[in-house]
Amino acid sequence: MWEVPYNLIWTYDSSVSQPKIKLQGNEINITLNNTKFKLDKVFAAKWTRVLKLIIYDRLALRVQEINALTVKQPIEKIALKNNFSKWGSCSGQKLSFSLMLFFCSSAQIDYVIVHELCHLVHKNHSTSFWKLLGSFIPKYREIDQSLKFKSYKIGALLKFE
């Protein structure tokens, strides 16, 4: 889904009082005031804004494309959240996705999208839900396992204080 890879560029500048994050083309420039920087709520808010700028439009388009090919259900809203506990959620006809998808492969992103779209049909993880999901992604168990491992790694990397 991410045609262009994004490069994270870290710079240290003692003259800045707050961390700065700037999106320039396919580069995410992060300027910190020292090498002992802690990921705090100010940084998390800036990081969230940058990631939303990068992925929202493409993710929303991909959700619509996959919906048209799979469950063909109405969607009221698509949202992005700075959520570390789950990759996506479905409430009524509203779908929410974690910003952590930025770190995922296209196959993993498509799996999360299909998973949440299937919740538009089956609101739980019943046998019918998994059968529907499996009809679209036969190897869903493998992708689900890879996401559990990735979630653990990203969560350990991005702990905000």
Image: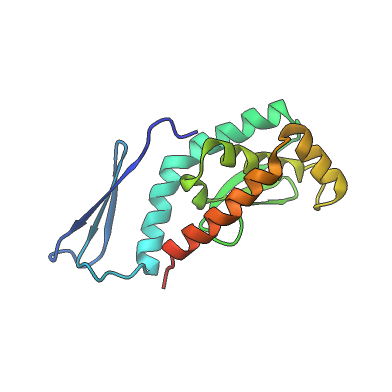
- Where residue 91 sits: x, y (%)? 72, 52
- Where residue 106 sits: x, y (%)? 53, 36
Q: How many marks?
A: 0
Q: Nearer the viewer, residue 100 or 72?
A: 100
Q: Nearer the viewer, residue 16 or 6?
A: 6
**Can you tell which quarter of the image residue 23 is in?**
top left
* Colour scheme of the picture: rainbow
Q: Nearer the viewer, residue 159 or 42?
A: 159
Q: In the image, what residue occupies the spot 25% across and 65% down?
A: 18
Q: In the image, what residue occupies the spot 45% across and 47% down?
A: 52
Image side of residue 158 versus residue 140, left or right: left
Image side of residue 53 versus residue 61, left or right: left
Image: 43 above or below 75: below
- Where residue 151 sits: x, y (%)? 54, 57
Q: In the image, what residue occupies the spot 26% across and 62% down?
A: 19
Q: In the image, what residue occupies the spot 45% across and 34% down?
A: 2
Identify the image quadrant of the C terminus: bottom left
Image side of residue 96 versus residue 29, left or right: right
The residue sitting at the bottom extreme is: 161
The residue sitting at the left extreme is: 15
Image side of residue 49 versus residue 73, left or right: left
**Can you tell which quarter of the image residue 69 is in?**
top right
- Where residue 64 sits: x, y (%)? 63, 31
